[in-house]
Amino acid sequence: MINTDRAIELLIIDSSFDSAEGQINTLRNAGMAIHPKRVHSETDIVGALGSGTHDIILCSADVEKTEFDRNLDLCINTAADASLIIMYKNQEPDPLLNALRLGARDVVSINDPEHLQLVVKREFGDLLIRRDLADTRRRLREAETRCSTLVESSRDAIAYIHEGMHVLANPVYLQMFGYIELEELEGLPILDMIAPEDLPKFKKFLRTAESSQGELEIKCQNSEGEPFKATLEFSPASVEGEPCTQIIIRDSSPNKQLQQKLEQISSQDPQTGLYNRQFFTGRLDRIISQGEFTDRPLALLYITIDEFQKIRSDIGIGASDFLLQEFANLLKGQVNEPDLLARFGDHSFTILQEATNDQAASLASQLHKSVAAHLFRTDKDLVEPRCNIGIAFLTGTIPNSQEFINNAYSACGAARSGSNTGTAFYDAEEMQPEFGNQANETRLNELIQNALESDGFKLVYQPVVSLQGESREFYAVLTRLLDSNGDEILPNHFMGAASQGSQMALIDRWVIKNAIQELVLQREKGQKVQFFVNLSLESLEDKETLLWICDCLRDHRAKGAWIIFQIREADLRSHMTEAKELLDGLKKIKCQIAIDRYGVLSKSDTLLKHLPIDYVKFDPALVEGIAGKQELQDNLVKLNTETQSHGVKTIVIGVEDANSLAVLWTIGVNYIQGYFLQEPSDSISYEFTGT
């Protein structure tokens, strides 16, 4: 939808201040919102036009011919898509007609203010339509390019048929039927691809309504006449504007190569191409259970990239993913064929090899040298990561892969914290895992499971306070994991392990149930509190999440309006279909929706256009140190205004000082959350009325 309510960026080229003021007043008297700027020298005109931020240009014709020609030339060749209107008082018709021929949108007398108002309204509306059309065409081209790329790279055979003849096919289709080049197939009838005994069945199908959009199991034949069973899916499509039929063919015959490919996919990490965690632990369990290590020493190297979360925060998600790929490739170059290399976690890797103590130490030393010598480049700078390596050896007392990996992980923790060269060997007497500090993932998974079964989690609450004078009692619900000593483990220590162990959806359910119970207690006390509660990616993907929430609300006689469910922007973007279904369902039971970690991805407001969002919580990176950084302030002003224009309330989290609070109040943010107000607490007792 075209937004004609926004202010018009107006550039006036006129040496007369009074004339320019008259034009500005004329437009404002018509109720138009404008941001005017007047220039008249060549230098100022070039600078203004070069900024590319103007919608309408009013250019005076009442100057010397050479000056008018120069200004006209600058506007037409520099002003991109801005609408140029020529203003005149005493001017011959020929220069005005020439301006129209060269590209001016209209000519208006300065003595006719009503004409100026009508022309500017018309041109601004047309300009927005032109821009929207250009954007639509660009997105269409991008969509067509993506579709073509998807068709080319699809594992399914895809062809396009017009009047019974092939006009386009992807490489898989060509290979399936024994052709090399598309030219061999162009103009070939689709009937030639059907086995003779099934031709009557195919022709009969073509005469039915399902032939435009349906499915058919049939025997096809390749260029050598060899038959094979296949499933054909028909759907309407177009190629270069011409209507045609898309056919997707899936070979129904047993395919060993396809089976091998599926097995390969199930064992590989898709980002790095290394073996994944599941495959690695499965292979290790088999080695231990079969006693394959009894006649040779087996070493396990557990490798992590040091301070990777800080690196990711500094260089961004895309660059850090590229760094992980480079790091994985570097590891590949340092291991031999019998060695088993895997990506074990987000930024952790494992190597299993036959090696003595000295050989394992030598490999670790070589890995450190290779990492130090490699140039990890980003768009802006070089990154110089270091790695920590823990080494453990398989002995007869180790019962399973989990114990073996725990030992190597503990050694890696010692390598990280000790005064060494970044490598440590496992020492059973010195390296007892402790939860909270260097908690290893496997033992954390066990602790999380115990916590789920015996209420070993704890909820804490942090107020979310209005900067606009509202007194709503909002609290963010945060989760703590309790270890065997009752000490709290913060989310950044255990959420990664929970995600790796597929436990996040269960944790979400524990949190939701206990949050609802607390809400009921607070409401019975007369406190009209509302909670912000996180939903993880796993809950977003779980088809039972909505039904479970409905049951939980009913069981505790609670109302959906008491809860605002918040989901990370990245998770919503990557799972739009599931998100739309879940969020629509939550809205039906009166729950509200917030986007967490919002604003760092491109075109974030796309989600606001397609999903029923009530609040956004800006990513902390957008406001870190905002009090002293004008660039951050300008960016947040734009993002805050854009978000609120969709009717969505804005929240800044991580507020820790009064200077930031003053800036956020000036910007017009709706709510804030952070340690400056109150750290997360067991109690729900913040005094909102005094804010």
Image (cartoon, rainbow, N blue to C red):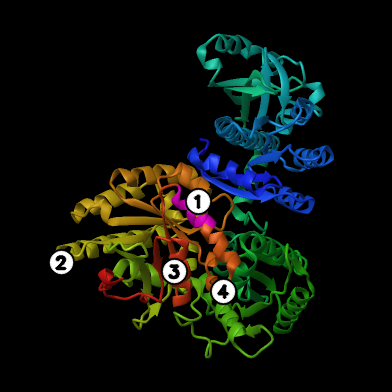
Q: Amino acid at mark 4?
A: Gly
Q: Which mark is residue 525?
A: 2
Q: Position of residue 232 (x, y in %)?
A: 59, 24
Q: Is residue 601 left or right of residue 670?
A: right
Q: Earlier in the sequence, mark 4 or mark 3?
A: 3
Q: Which residue is at a point 55% across and 8% down the rendered structure image?
A: 207
Per the image, label 3 sits on a secondary structure element best described as helix
Location of residue 254 by image quarter:
top right
How crowded pointer 4 is (Cα within 10 Å; few <14, some 14-19, many 20+) is rated as: few
**Front: mark 1 or 3:** 1
Q: Which mark is residue 445?
A: 3
Contact flag, marks 1 and 3 (Cβ < 8 Å): no
Disc 4 designates what residue?
Answer: 628
Q: CA distance from mark 1 to mark 3?
A: 41 Å
Per the image, label 2 sits on a secondary structure element best described as loop
Q: Amino acid at mark 3?
A: Asn
Q: Amino acid at mark 2?
A: Lys
Q: Which residue is at a point 48% across and 72% down the rendered structure image?
A: 660
How crowded pointer 3 is (Cα within 10 Å; few <14, some 14-19, many 20+) is rated as: many
Q: Which mark is residue 642?
A: 1
**Front: mark 2 or 3:** 2
Q: Is residue 257 left or right of residue 646?
A: right
Q: CA distance from mark 2 to mark 3?
A: 37 Å
Q: CA distance from mark 4 to mark 2?
A: 43 Å
